[in-house]
Image (cartoon, rainbow, N blue to C red):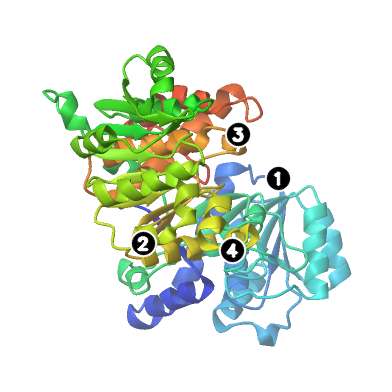
């Protein structure tokens, strides 16, 4: 099951529904939130003999901090609370736990200079200044507190969201808490999957604080975070008496003189991610090269001109007897490619994965998608998405989810918008984001070709396209993480991802991996 991603308004609606409709007391939710903060702290750092400073604001996020202080007082050598807000401005639930903290004899620091001195001596800081309702920039006093925390050597834990970060925005205004870990409640906040705001969260742990399923289902979230169980479900099971036809047939069509590697990597990725049969259709001039480079992948030599593919009826026939067509990897940018793409969309009846130069051809006439009959998946990076939509890359990067959703809905296609947190958008409005796997070493030539092959492979043996594409994105990222663990992010290549692809699938299928953020 995936984890939901909420905007601030959505999260507020979920909380309100839980309290007002489901009858869950706000104090209980606050206590559960505090308990989850303490639990995640204990997983990561020894609390004994540590000085802990808890920054509390006036709202319910501050109440989480007051409640956590009451639980930490017996676990830490010293617990101090910093609360610069006047007592009579505290929310009712926050005021309850403020009073409890006072009864426990916990020192509550209300002077800015004393607060800065306490932070400088802290081993641990719990940031509970602001929650998902925060907008804009911190006040000057709060900014001084946050700057002191960031300058300290303390281990920093944020409650729900790092103070200074908006729940919804990719950009930040002024100083923000730089957390070591953020314990976020019920689901991810949108800013946790947006750059640059996500960089302040540190490690993310999502805590169940007792919000009923009914409350969560009362609001459609902005997106879902792809989890290993989703990938596992898409992989399915392999019968002992199965044959190769049971695991899908993939036709990879691409390549041009000097670009044999792209189609090779896609074909190999399809094979290594479980397809029972893979054929690579390439210009005749590359046929012998592909025969030498591949062993299990079949090769189909096709009509060419100056080393590039031309329309060839053999390619259409092959695509229609296979289960999925992947097109565009290394095919070049000649005008003939656009003509070929038009014929493919008009004549191929099976699902199509469009990547790389296929997307360049599509950008010359996006309307070719109008009225298409077969399922189509496009796999652009931000630059290719900007070209398809006629906007600049900065616009795409600022609102990746919305642009992916918009294109998917308008053209009735599936969109995989590649990047550090790859977005998968379906025509019906479903969106999933890969947040917990992948690394910067995957920003290398051929990485997208590998992903296209994985997508085609998983699509070839399932009717649930959205789940298959989520699984493809996750497994691709996990293969990248395994490669980085072995080779390092600087030295890894796309072929290293190919090598680790079977191991990524094995880890996913056996459920033995553990993701950052405490996910199993």
Secondary structure beneath dot 3 equals helix
Q: Could you tell whether 219 is left or right of 192 in the image? A: left
Q: Could you tell whether 54 is left or right of 474 in the image? A: right
Most extreme residue toward the front is 305
- Is residue 355 at least partly visible in the picture? no
For marks 1 and 3, the one nearer the N-term is 1
Residues at badges 4 and 1 in contact (C-beta under 8 Å)? no
Whole-Å distance between the Cαs marked 2 and 1? 48 Å
Whole-Å distance between the Cαs marked 3 and 2? 28 Å
Residue denoted by label 1: 49
User: Where is residue 150 drawn, in percent x and y?
Assistant: 78, 55
x 79%, y 47%: residue: 153
Vertical side of 115 occupied by 72: above or below: above
Q: Nearer the viewer, mark 4 or mark 3?
A: 4
Q: Nearer the viewer, mark 2 or mark 1?
A: 2
x 48%, y 45%: residue: 335
For marks 3 and 2, the one nearer the N-term is 2
For marks 2 and 4, the one nearer the N-term is 4
Q: Nearer the viewer, mark 4 or mark 1?
A: 4
Residue 391, label in figure = 4
Secondary structure beneath dot 2 equals loop
User: Where is residue 35 drawn, in percent x and y?
Assistant: 51, 59
Residue denoted by label 3: 441
């Amino acid at each position: 099951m995936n984890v939901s991603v909420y905007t601030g308004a959505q999260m507020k609606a979920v909380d309100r529904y839980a309290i007002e409709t489901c009858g869950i007391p706000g104090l209980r939710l606050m206590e559960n939130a505090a308990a989850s903060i303490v639990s995640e702290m204990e997983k990561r750092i020894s609390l004994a003999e540590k000085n802990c400073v808890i920054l509390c604001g006036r709202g319910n996020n501050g109440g989480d901090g007051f409640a956590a202080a009451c639980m930490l007082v017996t676990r830490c050598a010293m617990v101090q609370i910093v609360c610069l807000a006047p007592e009579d401005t505290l929310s009712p639930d926050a005021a309850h736990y403020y009073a409890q903290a006072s009864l426990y004899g916990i020192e509550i620091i209300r002077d800015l200079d004393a607060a800065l001195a306490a932070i400088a001596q802290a081993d641990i800081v719990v940031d509970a200044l602001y929650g998902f309702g925060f907008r804009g920039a911190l006040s000057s006093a709060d900014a001084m507190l946050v700057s002191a925390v960031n300058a300290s050597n303390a281990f920093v834990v944020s409650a729900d969201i790092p103070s200074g970060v908006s729940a919804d925005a990719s950009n930040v205004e002024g100083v923000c808490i730089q957390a070591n870990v953020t314990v976020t409640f019920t689901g991810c906040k949108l800013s946790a999957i947006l750059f640059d705001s996500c960089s302040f969260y540190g490690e993310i742990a999502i805590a169940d604080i007792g919000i009923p399923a009914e409350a969560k289902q009362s609001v459609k979230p902005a997106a879902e975070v792809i989890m290993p169980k989703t990938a596992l479900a898409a992989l399915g099971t392999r019968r002992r008496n199965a044959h190769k036809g049971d695991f899908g047939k993939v036709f990879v069509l691409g390549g041009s003189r000097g670009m044999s590697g792209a189609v090779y990597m896609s074909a190999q990725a399809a094979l290594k991610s479980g397809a029972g049969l893979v054929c690579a259709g390439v210009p005749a001039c590359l046929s012998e090269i592909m025969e030498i480079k591949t062993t299990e992948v079949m090769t189909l030599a096709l009509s060419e001109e100056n080393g590039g593919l031309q329309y060839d009826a053999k390619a259409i026939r092959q695509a229609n007897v296979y289960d999925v067509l992947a097109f565009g990897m290394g095919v070049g940018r000649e005008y003939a490619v656009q003509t070929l793409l038009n014929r493919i969309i008009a004549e191929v009846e099976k699902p199509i994965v469009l990547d790389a130069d296929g997307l360049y051809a599509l950008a010359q006439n996006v309307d070719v998608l109008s009225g298409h009959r077969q399922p189509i998946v496009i796999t652009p990076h931000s630059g290719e998405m900007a070209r398809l939509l006629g906007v600049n890359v900065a616009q795409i990067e600022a609102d990746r989810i919305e642009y992916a959703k918009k294109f998917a809905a308008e053209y009735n296609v599936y969109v995989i918008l590649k990047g550090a947190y790859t977005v998968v958008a379906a025509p019906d409005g479903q969106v999933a984001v890969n947040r917990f796997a992948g690394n910067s070493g995957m920003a290398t030539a051929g990485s997208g070709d590998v992903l296209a092959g994985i997508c085609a492979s998983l699509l070839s043996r399932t009717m649930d396209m959205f789940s298959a594409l989520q699984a493809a994105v996750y497994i691709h990222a996990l293969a990248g993480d395994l490669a980085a663990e072995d080779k390092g992010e600087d030295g890894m290549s796309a072929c290293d991802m190919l090598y680790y692809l079977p191991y990524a699938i094995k880890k996913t299928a056996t459920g033995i991996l553990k993701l950052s953020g405490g996910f199993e």
